[in-house]
Image (spheres, grey):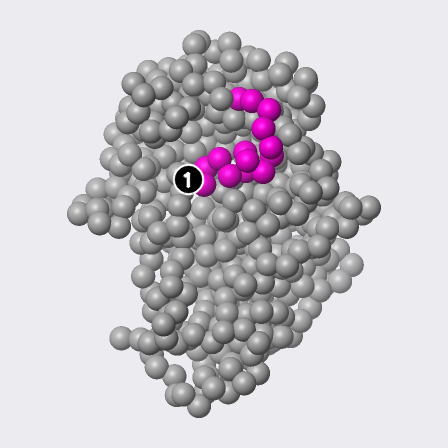
Amino acid sequence: MTTVLEPAAVESLQASFLGDVIRPGDATYDDARMIWNGHIDRRPAVIARCRGVADVIAAVRFAREHDLPAAVRCGGHAVAGHALCDDGIVIDLSSMTGSRVDPLAQTIRVEGGCLGEHLDRESQAFGLATTGGIVSHTGVAGLTLGGGIGHLMRKFGLSIDSLRSCDVVTAEGELLVASEDENPDLFWGLRGGGGNFGIATSFEFQLYPLGPTVLAGMLAWPMDAAPEVLRFLRDFVADAPDEVGIMGNLRLAPPLPVIPEELHGKPIVALVPIYAGSLEEGEEALRPLRNLGTPAVDAVVPKPYVAHQKMFDPALPHGRHYYWKSHKLGPLDDDVIDVVVDRAGQITSPLSSIPIFTQGGAVGRIPEDATAFPNRNAAHDINIVASWMPDEPEPDRHMEWVRGFFGALEPFSKGVYVNFTNDDPAERVRSGAYNPEQWSRLVSLKAKYDPTNFFRFNANIPPGDGR
């Protein structure tokens, strides 16, 4: 049963609101409460679709005045469904997608509702880029506030490493600027602490020369080659230059034209590289991948950077059902590889996948205490992603596959990337997503900026002692 607010209360919000105020029963309500993960089905009492900072402030103050739970939606891409709540207000920034590039300073400022595709399109118009995610419809805000891993991180660091400032609406409905010069304690916490401290209504990033054409793509082999390919990945990245971004992926081969028809539906292992430098240097740096056995697929070609950023979009569309769990890992030793290959062979859905992200390079050279992002010395993030269609009659079997795989890797875990948390218990957020010093500092910041835990639909950092 959805909470119904008094019409007069909602009308008072609408009177001071430029955007749309959407209620149950409105024609657009069901569409407005849909997010990327179709497995999430929640019914807010009101959705406040903001057009600007004044709307965000009004929505926060309305929620406080009426004692409403408040979720914040930007890209709506969190697998756990943090962008929605039942019987509360959704403060929705998805219409706030303005941006401005300063090509001389090589910076971009984007509003809080921007997606990766907005950031990439605008910056690439000037031959510039910064680290974004690997799916173009991921929200810049959620990605960045949790750290921001992506194809370019070995060269340019995490998204937070290029962040220069944020505008933030606090739990009291006040606007602050957070940067190294203004409210530096808040700026530290925003770089890895997630949405715990306020609503970031804009972000300014440093940009770097890249593209518009890069050498990038995918190589794939039958799953029988997975042990050899993953050992190669381990050894290759140990000495690879920062310009090499690379991830692994294990799954059942989708029916794409680039994949031979005889492999469709069969288990494969793939490597997805990008070279953040000249095409000529990239050909030399990536040649060892092409010489690894005989790839069944070699689609590493010069291509627009924006096209590479959209490569995974068709595999991860809106509306499908998703469930995942994740670990940070060290170098892929043989025991880890054995587990990964064995569990990948038990995959239950042709839509599921196991991406393995590779850190190193610039990520590991930032001091651990410089931001709220821990485990910078980890080698990889593995994300065990189950995906299935909405009419799947037995969804539990896909989730059980994830949980079993996750459990088998627990002895090797070095924590978790906070953006990859899902239904993880609070203790894992406390001790897995942050180190003890970071956690203590984050709890103090929470007590300062959000003492009532108004922003709690997230990987939550509670005020107080944090337990």
In the rendered view, would you say 109 is above or below 60? above
Q: In front here: 453 or 99?
A: 99
In the rendered view, would you say 125 is above or below 455? above
State the SS at label 1.
helix
Task: Classify the position of the N terminus by image quarter.
Answer: bottom left
Residue labelled with disc 1: 314
**Which residues are the magenta region?**
300-314
Q: In front here: 157 or 5?
A: 5
Mark 1 is on which residue type? Pro
x and y, in percent, of residue 314 in the image = 41, 39
Q: Residue 324 colored magenta?
A: no
Q: Residue furthest right?
A: 104
Q: Residue furthest bottom?
A: 8
- The image quarter containing residue 199 is bottom right
Q: Is residue 422 visible?
A: no
Q: Residue 311 colored magenta?
A: yes
The residue drawn where x is 42% and y is 29% is 249
x and y, in percent, of residue 155 in the image = 66, 32
Mark 1 Cα shell of 10 Å, populated few (<14), some (14-19), many (≥20): few
Q: In front here: 220 or 160?
A: 220
Q: Is residue 207 visible?
A: yes
The residue drawn where x is 39% and y is 69% is 28
